[in-house]
Amino acid sequence: MRFSLSDEEHALVASAASGERLAVGAYAAQAVLNAARGGVQPQYASLREALAIVMHASGQARRIGANLNQAVAALHSGEASPQLRWYAEAAARTVEKLDDLADEVCRRLP
């Protein structure tokens, strides 16, 4: 297999190969095989891990919100207590922030 790189691209690949203590050809072969097998590219691994953590946290926050909704319904009153309302609003803000963060991580992934 043959492919061409610009001088800038070659320097980038050579630098990455050197960091891994591999010859440029060996590094390129590993990268191509990893991509062909559907492997995660190293530069995106930390973003993917962060996305998984954010998604888990978002799910937990949604469960908190559901529990708060059940607590409010259990009060059988027209007005929830101020503390309960504060917790519900805090949960909603947290979920919104987590969703925004997850969207940002997704935009940075290929």
Image: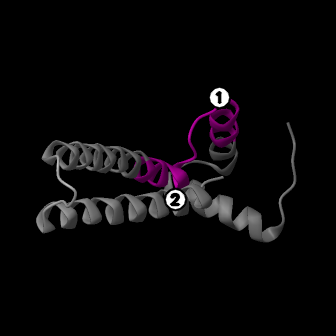
Residue 87 percent across, percent down from the top left:
19, 62
Q: On residue 20, which mark appears?
A: none
Q: On residue 105, which mark appears?
A: 2
- The residue drawn where x is 59% and y is 54% is 17
Q: Residues within 10 Å of mark 2 (few under 14, many from 20)?
A: some
In depth, the one of 107 and 95 nearer the eye is 95
Marks 2 and 1 in Cβ contact (< 8 Å): no
Give the alpha-carbon distance from disc 2 to disc 1, as whole Å.
23 Å
Q: Main secondary structure of the magenta part?
A: helix
- The residue drawn where x is 67% and y is 33% is 33
Amino acid type, label 2: Val
- The residue drawn where x is 16% and y is 60% is 84
Q: Secondary structure at mark 2?
A: helix
Amino acid type, label 1: Arg
Q: Is residue 53 above or below residue 10?
A: above
In depth, the one of 81 and 23 nearer the eye is 81
Instruction: Specify which label sits upstream in the sequence, 2 or 1.
Output: 1
Q: Is residue 106 magenta?
A: no
Q: In the rendered view, does 110 fall on the left or right side of 1?
A: left
Q: Which residue is mark 1?
A: 37
Q: Which residues are magenta?
A: 29-51
Q: In the rendered view, does 69 fall on the left or right side of 10?
A: left
Q: Residue 90's image quarter?
A: bottom left
Q: Is residue 32 magenta?
A: yes
